[in-house]
Image: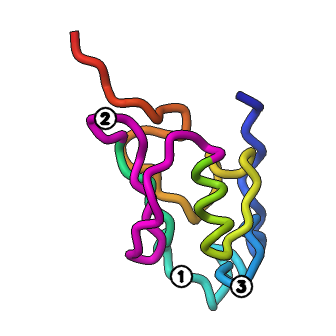
Amino acid sequence: MPAVPPRHRAGNTGMTGPGARPGGPDDAGAMAGKRPIIVHLPSPTGGRRVRVDGEILGLAHSVGDLVEFLRRAGLEIEPEQVADSPLIDWRGVGPDRWEAETRT
């Protein structure tokens, strides 16, 4: 997996498109600390539910799936930016886990 880029500068969310939010975390128009993109824990059968502003976009099995779901929702983000984006709330584990937890 490529190195994660440094955290976005204030005013630059790294996202563009009709659904992108203006400004960044320090911007008065920002979402007051709210992260509109939630990537849930891996499901028992693998994959992670992706929710944007309360709407489920689908079950992602990779960063590529996540980026595609966000693109279809009008949010442009590069795969290299997802791990560090202030707009994504990674539930439980980060972007390196997509499969169901195996129990021994």
Whether residue 56 is situated above or below residue 96 in the rendered picture: below
Q: Which mark is residue 18?
A: 3
Q: Amino acid at mark 1?
A: Met
Is disc 3 in contact with disc 1, using a CB cutoff of under 8 Å?
Answer: no
Q: Position of residue 64 (x, y in %)?
A: 65, 45
Nearest to viewer (mark 3 / mark 1): 3
Residue 15's image quarter?
Answer: bottom right
For the point 63% across and 90% down, the residue is: 29
Q: Amino acid at mark 3?
A: Pro
Q: Which mark is residue 45?
A: 2
The magenta stretch is: 42-64
Residue beneath disc 1: 31
Q: Position of residue 17 (x, y in %)?
A: 75, 78
Whichever of callouts 2 and 1 sits on the residue coming sooner in the sequence is 1
Q: Amino acid at mark 2?
A: Thr
Residue 56: in magenta span: yes
Q: Circle 1 sits in a helix, a strand or a loop, which is it?
A: loop
In the image, 46 versus 15, the foreground residue is 46
Q: Is residue 40 left or right of residue 44?
A: right
Q: Position of residue 82 (x, y in %)?
A: 64, 51
Which quadrant does the C terminus fall into? top left
Q: Circle 2 sits in a helix, a strand or a loop, which is it?
A: loop
